[in-house]
Image (tube, coloured by chain):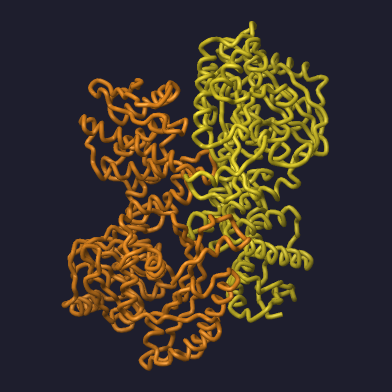
Chain colours: A orange, B yellow
Amino acid sequence: MTRTATASSSSSGAELPAQAARTAVVDLGSNSFRLVVFTATPRWWRRTDEIYEPVRISEGMGDAGMLQPAPLGRALQAVDVFAHFTRASGLPAADVHAVGTSAIREARNADEFLVRAQALSGLSIDVLSREREAFYGYVAAVNSTTLSDGVVLDLGGGSMQLVRVEDRGPRSTGSWPLGAVRMTERFLGSEKASKKALKTLREHVARALVDADLGGAHLVGLGGTVRNLAVAAQKAAEMPEFGVQGYRLTDAGLQELVERLAALPAARRGEVPGIKPERADLILAGALVVQAVLRAGGYGAVQATEAGLREGIFLAGHVRGDPPLIDDVREASVHNLAAQYDHDDVHSAHVARLALGMFDALAARRVHPGDPAERELLWAAAVLHDIGTAVDYDDHHKHSRYLILNAGLPGFDPRETALVALMARYHRKGTPRGGFLRPWLRKGDEAMLTRCAALPRVAEQLERSRDQIVREARVAQADGEVRLELVADGDVSVARWAAERQGDVFERAFGRPLTIAPG
Amino acid sequence: MTRTATASSSSSGAELPAQAARTAVVDLGSNSFRLVVFTATPRWWRRTDEIYEPVRISEGMGDAGMLQPAPLGRALQAVDVFAHFTRASGLPAADVHAVGTSAIREARNADEFLVRAQALSGLSIDVLSREREAFYGYVAAVNSTTLSDGVVLDLGGGSMQLVRVEDRGPRSTGSWPLGAVRMTERFLGSEKASKKALKTLREHVARALVDADLGGAHLVGLGGTVRNLAVAAQKAAEMPEFGVQGYRLTDAGLQELVERLAALPAARRGEVPGIKPERADLILAGALVVQAVLRAGGYGAVQATEAGLREGIFLAGHVRGDPPLIDDVREASVHNLAAQYDHDDVHSAHVARLALGMFDALAARRVHPGDPAERELLWAAAVLHDIGTAVDYDDHHKHSRYLILNAGLPGFDPRETALVALMARYHRKGTPRGGFLRPWLRKGDEAMLTRCAALPRVAEQLERSRDQIVREARVAQADGEVRLELVADGDVSVARWAAERQGDVFERAFGRPLTIAPG
């Protein structure tokens, strides 16, 4: 897969930077077909378009393993739609990566489909082996979470893939016939599920996994089943929602869902808030398989990620290395967002530098604990504080919060993302508080939020001329009051007064008044 | 003022299109100094940055009309900050338009400030005459509202300017010494205001306006006083807020505010929700002046706009013509927003074309009233339906709503903006409803919303291959059911089925089932 600069050659749409390149991934799955477009520049990438077709190509395949005429017809028509799309948007074939997964891999008459699809669309469809499919899932997981040692679980309709990850590398890959469709058909009927049926299914999975390479501290889950369970668990816990990236679904949370789902006949499981009606029939079996893996490995929780096979395929072409690994997923996420929306990254980087300098100096003077995790969130918020100006200058602090929550920060969990969003929200005014995001916060988080809003606020004022004239704010005294001395390249009277006007929030954060003096 | 392509020559920040040009307006007002940066490409413009300094240069000027040493010092320091900013951001002097208004215009020692400011910053400050100041206000008003015949009111601290507008042109300009500071000092103390004091002030204004060229149907108000009153009136009416662009503040709403403000001593008027504490001392007099104009001209309401002097100066350089007039403010607003965020405007334009075609054909068959105002909102929503993909593909319909509400649509009032936002929100799924925006809707608006969500939904499905393969959807029958015939350039089976899947919302909107046939 190569990438070419096609976006700028099109006259349509919002002006993208000249080096913007688009690549499409066409994912011909057992349940649905999807075409996804990723746009990338040297500095950022984002999914920009998608077409979804609920093809259900596996319908009626059964034990004979034959694609049936009706689903085959639907599949070809969907491929035709995709071909129209790629031609219309000027995507050359070299930039379209089409893959087939389990149904196509296993169908005895897959060639009939592949030949006709290629004739129709010109797309050459790459039928992934189980190992390659698992590998792309692994690529998605390690580049969208902080998983270093543990397991990536990818649950599909027919099978489940597990990749044991060690030091971010793939140590082993396994595939088990434990997919949600298969487990549903074998162990669960269409009625309420008995305790016995649940137990039997769990034990079957546990036995199958006896030789699985489960280990490491963390379990990351990919795929629609895990994401849908995470949505439902978030809703059950009444958490404010902004996707499920990084959400940790605990064994207890899963158990609660299992019990609610099992008490309903399959057709009514879509009534459980968050469960998609089109997954209603499969979700219980999926939940039990995930729970069995979680218990067999002793993980306590499965962390959801919104990235999956399609992102894995894109990233395998976009990120260097073998395996393709983004150096620091969290740092990259922050830069990815800033590059899309921030119009003055020199300014933002300097605000971050000044804020971190004060953070460190105040920690050295024992004015606050100096937690490295807090420091990283402060850095992220300072880098992202102004991205909301892409929406409107007025209230841009609130727009920054919106963009951080909704564009998302892979590598951070929802609590951390909420904290970064709140720190950015309070970089200009207002009393820092959790507000509607409070359910995500832990004890002590509002105090941290106040510190991490106060420092960028002071830094923002020191940087109000946007020319980095204040090079450093040294902590000259930190007993009764905090006195900052400014190291600067010119007259900074206005910056000084403006920063001192943030004394209120500073004192609330650090318990002492702020004065600022020339260096 | 010329515009040059400076943005792309800087290596910092999000990648702007190559032709992006920035211009700065420096507004040295009596109360505050502001530097505002506008970024423009051939297809859109937006305010991208701002520095605000609460200088209060007029402090202590009194009858002697002399700028005092302390405010002069603050003013020069603010100018120094601005000069640092413009140098750091690579804005050449030719792209910085610095203007002074009443305090500087009237100060007997203004030259001392102007000479020192220029020496310090290199900025040449253009001291506006009352007429030119009024003209720029007029330019802002006619290009951010649909005002064609009426009056533009611009209320400052010292004076009030009125521009009589006829057929969008400026017919006459007048200036009266009726500014909020002056009226406060003359008629109102720091305590609660008596009925008598209110009456005396109103009568004074009415007498002064006896020869004013008031007429036409509409009154548009500029400036901080009008905006702040609009915010307070919105809050009093418990309307969901997304700025005050286009908000109509009625005489009754104004009267209610006047009574609440008058019942408080000046220092406590900031307690009225929405009133900025820094305006607390002046807001009552300002409200009374606005009310007097409104009554003298028999307008019934004053429409607020968020554009003002600074936008007027920018637009005078950006828009052709004498006077500089955007042809169609509403159409331009929609295109301005789409050009910033939409990545496939050929697709969006085609969805709009298909939706409007169905709208017209169904109106011709008397399936719905075919209101031209509804048609325009439908067009706007169809053009803007996908802009939310700039935030994230997932939930992009909700992000479209957010961007429309928050980036705003000058020329539309809040109800219309809310309707366009809701139509975009429901272009993919969900039952169209007002939700948190319902307070803005009138009787019948939810039925209109349902129609204007249903048509883009059907059109979006017909355009799912994004290549305009369905050229037209003709209404072939509209009695018991609505039957559409597709005029297309190829096989459109998938599009047909997908569009028919939107039958539910279509039937809710138009009271009859939908079937779709090849043409």
Quadrant of image for the C terminus of chain A? top left
Q: Please provide percent x and percent y for residue B17.
A: 57, 51
Q: Quadrant of residue A517?
A: top left
Q: Please provide percent x and percent y for residue A158.
A: 34, 80
Q: Quadrant of residue A442?
A: top left
Number of numbered markers: 0
Residue at image location 60% in from the left, 44% down from the top: B5
Q: Please provide percent x and percent y for residue B87.
A: 52, 32
A518 lies above or below A45: above
Depth check: give the residue in front, B358 or B410: B410
A288 lies above or below B238: below
A100 lies above or below B303: below
Quadrant of image for the N terminus of chain A? bottom left
A192 lies above or below B138: below
Residue at image location 56% in from the left, 10% down from the top: B68
Q: Please provide percent x and percent y for residue B127.
A: 67, 22
Residue at image location 72% in from the left, 80% down from the top: B519
Residue at image location 37% in from the left, 26% down from the top: A504
Residue A260 appears in the picture as rendered: no
Depth check: give the residue in front, B375 or A112: A112
Q: Answer with left or right where residue A458 lies relative to residue B29.
A: left
Residue sitting farthest toward the bottom: A64
Q: Answer with left or right where residue A482 lies relative to residue A4.
A: left
Residue A86 appears in the picture as rendered: yes
Q: Quadrant of residue A482?
A: top left
